[in-house]
Amino acid sequence: MRVTFQEELDQLEASLQEEGALVLRVLRGALNALAQRDVELADEVISFDDDVDRLYLQIEQEIESLLARQTPVATDLRLVLAMLHVNLHLERMADYSVTIAKLTKLVADVEPDPMLLLSLQEMGERAEEMIRVALDSLANRDLHAAESLVDLDELIDRSNRRFVERVVEIVAEPGLREWVLRMVLVSRTLERIGDHAVDIGEQVAYLLTAEFREFTDASHPENNA
């Protein structure tokens, strides 16, 4: 019975990693569609999200079934709970990537501002890196890698601040106004993807230490200074 339970846990983890790979594919597609103003690719990203959703529901149902049939304790219970949260965070990342694709379609006929577009591409690359680090920290049970997500997230936040500063400079240009406003949403969306990666890191830390803690205390920013 114990071997069967362990096999189920291993399969769930494998499914989570598969979901993570799908999320990375969706995000990369959304970023490419944005850079190339490719409406067809944006549509592919939007439809591909269905694959992520199916896997998300499958994992959720398998976790519910496992909890109903087994009585995991200690590390096993923490792993199951962590996987439940990670599954949700990955699904939300895919949804945010779809948002980028939809925003791209709305302004695909507008010539973008090169500096802002470059900033968004840099943010996107950092978001991809954070997803990979988060998934690897889970697979390798690597607390240091999980905690490193805080520093990576700060890079995205800095890029977002620089993006906003540039927006203030050009938002008055009539031909770019709608594009800029849409891209502000894209920037915020990429920032949120980074936040979800940090949340996954927090779940890995919980799994390894049996203590849940937020890596950053948003309600008390003075403590992070």
Image (cartoon, rainbow, N blue to C red):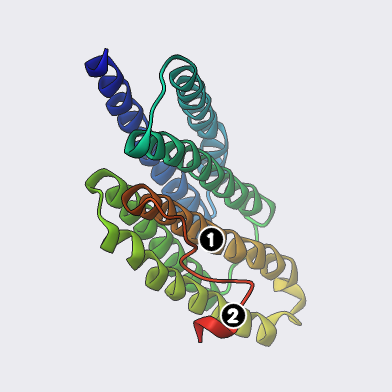
Question: Could you say which disc has been placed on residue 138 in the image?
Answer: none
Q: Earlier in the sequence, mark 2 or mark 1?
A: 1
Where is residue 22 shown, x and y percent of the image? 40, 37
* Residue closer to the observer: 184 or 9: 9
Where is residue 207 shown, x and y percent of the image? 36, 47
Image: 62 above or below 130 = above
Where is residue 73 shown, x and y percent of the image? 38, 32
- Residue under the image location 34 percent in, 34 percent down: 76
- Residue under the image location 45 percent in, 53 percent down: 32
- Residue under the image location 51 percent in, 45 percent down: 89
Residue neighbourhood size for the residue with mark 1, other residues' Cα within 10 Å, grouped as few (<14), some (14–19), many (≥20): many
Image: 184 above or below 132 = below
Residue 106 located left or right of residue 206: right
At label 1, which amino acid type do we have? Leu
* Residue closer to the observer: 157 or 76: 76
Question: Could you say which disc has been placed on residue 221 in the image?
Answer: 2
At label 2, which amino acid type do we have? Pro
Disc 1 secondary structure class: helix
Which residue, given by chain and number where applicable, does mark 1 sit on?
190
Disc 2 secondary structure class: helix
